[in-house]
Image: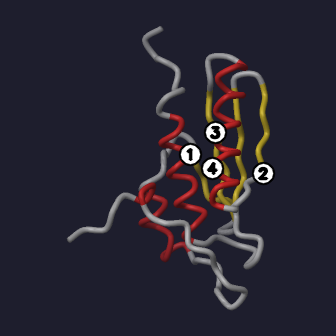
Amino acid sequence: MSEPALADQECEACTSEDEPLESEEYADYRAELRDDVWTVVDDHHLEGTYAFEDFRDALEFTSEVGELAEAEWHHPDIELEWGEVTIEMWTHKIDGLHKTDFVMAARMDRIYDDYEPDEEA
């Protein structure tokens, strides 16, 4: 039986004894995220920028991401601008990337599906 999609997996808290993931350890997780949104910066954190047609959609998306962060108790840095939301995320407890960061990013990608601008418009 195959593992569920990353967005469907649990956000598991890490301990201070856990080590940050190395690139070969997170490669499969990274492959499940949107290439047009997410990058891994210095093997330390995820950075993603989502595009929107207007400020209202960006604001609503930000609110939904905030609710997700509260529910999972895993809080990213969020920057909201007209037509754009930028997110930085890493696990502060280990000062690096953990599987939970990728699960959260995959869930944000899923939320974004409802907001993605129509390219034919």
In this view, the mark in front (1 or 4): 4
Tell me the residue at 36%/58% (across/down): 5
The image quadrant of residue 63 is: top right
**Where does label 3 land, which residue?**
64
Q: Residue furthest top?
A: 121
Q: Residue furthest bottom?
A: 17
**Where does label 4 land, which residue?**
68
Between marks 3 and 4, how big is the CA–CA gap?
6 Å
* Lateral position of residue 34 relative to residue 19, left or right: left
Between marks 2 and 1, how big is the CA–CA gap?
13 Å
Say what secondary structure mark 4 lies in. helix
Between marks 1 and 3, how big is the CA–CA gap?
9 Å
Q: Position of residue 117 (x, y in %)?
A: 52, 21
Q: Give the mark nearest the N terminus, 2 or 1.
A: 2
Location of residue 47 with respect to 37 vertically, above or below: below
**Where does label 2 land, which residue?**
77
Q: Nearer the viewer, residue 32 or 42?
A: 32
Q: Are marks 3 and 4 in contact (CB under 8 Å)?
A: yes
Tell me the residue at 48%/75% (across/down): 24
Q: Amino acid at mark 4?
A: Leu
Q: Position of residue 78 (x, y in %)?
A: 76, 44
